[in-house]
Image: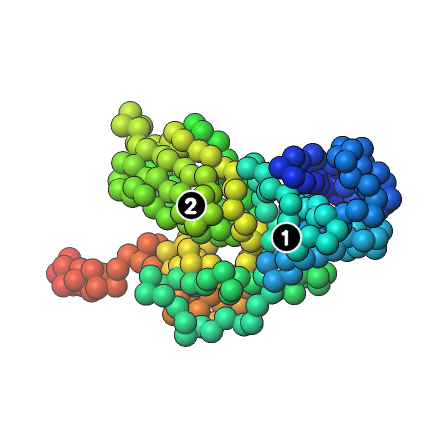
Amino acid sequence: MSNSKFGRFSYGGDSFIMCLSSSTKYDDMCATICLKFQNLKVGQYVLKYSLTDLPNCHLDSDEDIAVMMEIFEVLNSRFINIQIFDVGSSSSTSIVPSTVVMSATVSIAAPFDDGDVSSDDSNCEDDSNMILGNFVSDKMKRKYMSSEWNDYIFRIGQFFTGGAVEFRDKLCKYVVENGFQFCYTKNDKSRISAECAKKKRESCQWYVHASLRQSNNFFYITELNNEHTCVCVVRHQKHKRLGSNVVSTIISDKVRANPLVKTRDIMDYLKQDFGFEVAYHTAYRGKNTANRSLHGDEGIGYDYLPWYLEAV
C-alpha cells in the first residue's frame, strides 16, 4: 500500500475517493464509478486528470493508469484529482472538492531567465514559468535534502523557539517545497499572518497565523487552515520566496566550513542536493549574509583593529 495513491473522482458536485495503484485495472475503475454514480454507464463518460500544461490528460486504458501513477509517484503526491466528463461535453461537469490536500499539478516550461528577477532578491516566476524539470527521469525520483521542509508547518500549537525569524524562515521553506505562493497580511515582531496568494483569484482558504508568547518568547501557530482549494504546483525549481535570506540558512554549514566558497559552487550545491536553481546574485548575497551571521561584519572587525594594536 506504500505506493498507493488516493484518487478523488468528481462528477456533478459529488465525489468519492478510491485507492489506486499501478496494478489498478481500467475496467475495475469504471465499474466502481458506475457503482458510485448509478446514472452513469460505461461509454457515457470520459475520465481526465490535469497537469498545468496538459489540462486534459485522458484515462482510457490500463496503460494510461500506469503512466499517471508513475507521474504522481515522482511528484510525491498522495491525492489525484480525476474529473468525470459526460461524452460530448466541452466543459467539466464536476466540481473540484473544497478539501484539496495537495493538487499535483506541474508545468513544464522554458528555461528561466536569470536576468528576470524581481527587486525582492528572489527567484520570481508567474504561473507560466513554474518548472519541475525533467520529472520523468530517474534522477528526480531521489529525495532532495529539502524534503523535510514539507513538514515545517503542520498543526496549531506548533512552536518556534527562534521566534519570528525562525517562523518566517520555516514558512518560506514550506511554501517553496509545496509549490505555492503566499502573501503576508500581518508581519511584525509579535504577529505574523499569511494567506494563499490565490485567495482573491481562486478563493483559496489556506492561511496561517502565529504570534509571540511573552512567557518564553517562542512563536506559536494559533490558527491554521493547511488545505488548498486552488490549483497549485507541487514543487518547482525556482520560487519567489527562495531569496538570499533563505539561501543563507541553507548554506550556513558550507560557509562555516569554507568562508571563501565560490558562488558557482553554492549554485551547484543547491541544484544537486536541493533541486533548486538560483540566480548568481541571489547565491552571492546569500553567501555574504551567511558569512556576516557566522563571522560578523568585516567593517566592524576593522574598527576593532586600533584597540587590538593598543592591547598588544
Q: Position of residue 252 (x, y in %)?
A: 43, 55
Which of the pair 114/164 is nearer the observer? 114
Question: Left of 200 or right of it: where is 69?
Answer: right
- Tell me if mark 1 has few (under 14), some (14-19) or many (20+) residues whose alpha carbon lies within 10 angstroms of its own: few
Which residue lies most toward the front here? 88
- Left or right: where does residue 256 sit relative to residue 40? left
Q: Residue furthest top?
A: 215
Question: At x 64% / y 49%, what residue is drawn?
Answer: 92
Secondary structure found at label 2: helix
- Label 1: which secondary element: loop
Q: Is residue 142 visible?
A: no
> 225 above or below 260?
above
Counting from the top left corner in percent of width and height, residue 195 is at 40, 43
Q: Amino acid at mark 2?
A: Lys
Q: Residue visible at 41% across and 74% down?
A: 115
Return the residue at label 1. Answer: 91
The percent position of residue 167, horizontal first and vertical second, equals 38, 41
Tell me the kind of residue under disc 1.
Answer: Ser
- Whichever of callouts 1 and 2 sits on the residue coming sooner in the sequence is 1
